């Protein structure tokens, strides 16, 4: 359970950095508290998408991983971010990613920041 909370906080931090750096990834809200709450909920959705959908997509695109020497990971991460944006819209969360290339750059930022935060934040191990 502690690991789940740490990963969710890391995802929320990474998403916040992407929102801060990229104009086409938006998070709106009336107050800072509402934005933080929305960010945590989006981080949960993003975590679920990465846990449930990403492994299936990776298996289906395995030949492309070999062919592109892993660069297809950028596209897969972008698709997971776009799916999260779509689900956030369905769930009436005020988070939106505008466009594929924004999602590629956002996915790259989120991957790097999430990795760094997971290195710093405490873990069960």
Image: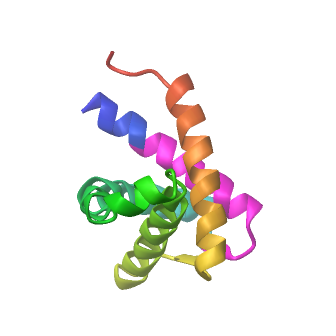
Q: Residue at x 61, y 43 (%)?
A: 112
The colour style of the image is rainbow
Could you tell me which residue is drawn at 51 percent across and 58 percent down? 68
Confirm whether residue 27 shows in the render: no
Q: Answer whether residue 109 is visible to the viewer in this image.
A: yes
User: Which residues fall within the magenta stretch?
Assistant: 8-28
Q: Position of residue 55 (x, y in %)?
A: 27, 55
- Residue 92 picture location, percent across and down: 40, 81
**Considering the image in quadrants, where does the C terminus appear?**
top left
Looking at the image, which residue is at 48% across and 48% down? 11
Which residue: 33% across, 58% down?
Answer: 62
Which quarter of the picture shows residue 42? bottom left
**Of the pair 4 and 81, the residue shown nearer to us:** 81
Q: Quadrant of the N terminus?
A: top left
121 vs 38: above or below: above
* Magenta stretch holds residue 5: no
Name which quarter of the figure residue 106 lies in. bottom right
Quarter of the view holding residue 6: top left
- In this rendering, the count of numbered labels is 0
Image height of 78 relative to 91, above or below: above
Left or right: residue 26 compared with residue 77: right
């Amino acid at each position: 359970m502690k690991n789940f909370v740490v990963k969710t906080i890391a995802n929320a931090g990474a998403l916040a950095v992407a929102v801060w750096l990229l104009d086409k990834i938006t998070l709106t809200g009336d107050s800072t508290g509402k934005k933080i709450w929305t960010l945590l909920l989006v981080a949960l959705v993003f975590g679920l998408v990465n846990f449930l959908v990403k492994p299936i997509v990776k298996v289906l695109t395995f030949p492309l991983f070999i062919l592109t020497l892993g660069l297809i990971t950028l596209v897969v991460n972008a698709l997971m971010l776009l799916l999260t944006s779509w689900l956030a819209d369905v769930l009436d969360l005020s988070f939106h990613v505008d466009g594929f290339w924004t999602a590629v750059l956002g996915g790259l930022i989120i991957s790097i920041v999430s990795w760094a935060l997971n290195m710093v934040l405490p873990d069960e191990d």
